[in-house]
Amino acid sequence: MPRLRALTALGLIAGLSMPLGAQTVRPAVVEYHEQARGRFELVNESLFPLTVVLDVRGFHVEPSGELIESPLDTSVVDVRLSAMSFRIPPRQTYVVSYEARAKSYPAWFIISSALTGARTASGLNVRVILPHVVYMLQEESLRANDVIVRALEFDRPTQKVRLTLENTSDALGRALSTTVSGDAGKPQEGGAFPLFPHSIRRVEIPWPHDVAPRQLLVEFADFKLDRRRPVSAAWASALGAPEQR
């Protein structure tokens, strides 16, 4: 089964080294409320014309954050693209439009762009895969009471904070940012991630200090989770209610 790393990875390179110039998809991740009608750009910054083939795929995300591709269930999600294959001249941009609807929401899929034709400085051909990830959200947003902090631990040997969240609802939401802070050093960012319906998500955040952090802040679109600990307490569990915004 083909695999992509977590959603923070915006592209996979199949080749020995990067080509002259670069290829980019923008935006890489988008959200819609129910039906999607959007577009994305593929940018060819190389000196070579590129051949592009598009493929629409389904996926799910493991608790670790690993994204696993799967065939799209076309009986549930219908996606229509303005083109399935095309060429992009050197230093040019191509715009792909699409429409998507689902039998029920939330729903999600990937439009995968396979770009070929670029070569490395040594003349080797390079194939680049760039995913455009689409989330079609439900009418009602994820709520603070839907999200439970199952674990919050500081692993001193590895200098990482380990967070486990559970979404107990039918709604899909995305954490827009994750931050840990304390008396030592600057706050550390853990990045954004999706929280799927009835799922567990584990997140690791670097904390390069011997003293445990004192605060975790996870921000969603409509609320934030704010967890703090006393200086003398062992930070092995998360207590307290989510804070509404």
Image: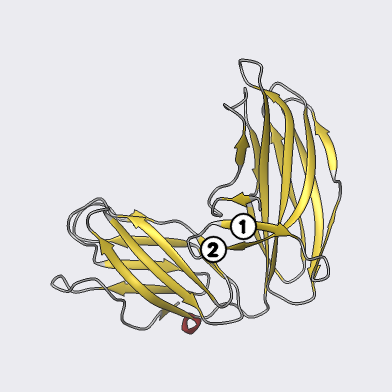
What residue is disc 1 on? 68
The residues tagged by marks 1 and 2 sit, at their Cα atoms, a distance apart of: 7 Å
The reply, left or right, for residue 55 in relation to residue 202 is right
Please name the amino acid that badge 1 sits on.
Answer: Ile
Provide residue 73's location: percent of width, then percent of height.
78, 66
Please name the amino acid that badge 2 sits on.
Answer: Glu
Provide residue 110's location: percent of width, then percent of height.
70, 55
Residue ID at (81%, 55%): 98
Do the CB atoms of the residues marked 1 and 2 lie less than 8 Å apart? yes
The reply, left or right, for residue 51 in relation to residue 128 is right
Q: Secondary structure at mark 2?
A: loop
What residue is disc 2 on? 62
Residue ID at (36%, 61%): 179
How is colour applied across the structure in the image?
secondary structure
Q: Secondary structure at mark 1?
A: strand
Image-quadrant location for residue 95? top right
The reply, left or right, for residue 21 in relation to residue 150 is right
The 10 Å Cα crowd at callout 2, few under 14, some 14 to 19, many 20 or more, is some
User: Which of these two is toward me, 100 or 153?
Assistant: 153
Residue 89's label in the rendered image is: none
Provide residue 193's location: percent of width, then percent of height.
51, 61
Image height of 186 relative to 59, above or below: above
Question: Residue lying furthest top in this view?
Answer: 122
